[in-house]
Image (tube, grey):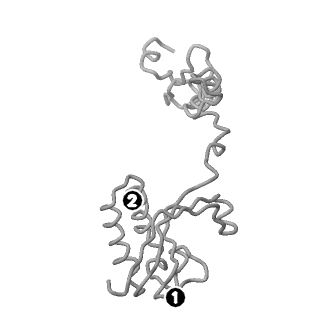
Amino acid sequence: MSDSSLSSGYAAAPADTGGVERPIKRRGLTGRKRAPWRVRYLAAGLILYPALAFYGPRGGHAEFYPFFDWDLFASAPAMFADAVLVVRAVDGEPLAEPQLFFDMADTFAAARRGDIRLAKLLDKMVIAHWHGKVDDVAAFNDIVRTTYLQDARSVSYDLAVIRYDAEERYRTGAIAKTIILQSFEKTADE
């Protein structure tokens, strides 16, 4: 090989190749072939990930979130609360047992549709009740009467908050506690 062939990156053609020049394969100082970039990044990640997990900042916690969070569901509350309408009577006929509005799909179209807007409205109504905003509660109640209870001529109902264990409610439908906040009547005149 001549000096000019090394600087151009091609080796001089040996006699047995028919005079074709081949590129020189340079392998760095050690002469070994380098691993592909994906393998290098994977190896670096496998080394750095545990290092960050064990030596990273903890802020006084036993867990370092992106790495270890074994206590993911232990902090979720077992009891949930929802604002609901409890219907006591429809068209002058008292129900044998008060029922939740959304369980009365055979009577109310909004219950059949599972209209989420009512649930949001009831949340706002409960907050207004707790803050003592009587005018807001009355305005929300007008919306409930005219929009969601329009399928019946008269309805006796309560604004309530139910507390329940989510798993138990899913399995059996059981409600742990019902807190009645305010009672309302929709009459046939409205």
- Residue assigned mark 1: 93
* 19 over 180 or under it: above or below: above
Q: Nearer the viewer, residue 136 or 6?
A: 136
Amino acid at dot 1:
Glu
Eyeballing the image, is 172 above or below 24? below
Q: Which mark is residue 4?
A: none
Crowdedness of circle 2 by 10 Å Cα count: few (<14), some, many (20+)?
some
Q: Nearer the viewer, residue 108 or 98?
A: 98
Query: What secondary structure is found at the residue carrying circle 1?
Result: strand
> Disc 2 to disc 1, how far (Cα)?
29 Å
Q: Amino acid at mark 2?
A: Lys
- Tell me where residue 29 appears, x and y as whole percent: 57, 13
Say which label, 2 or 1, has the lower sequence index: 1
Q: Nearer the viewer, residue 160 or 78?
A: 160
Residue at position x 41%, y 79% in the image: 149
* Residue that mark 2 sits on: 124
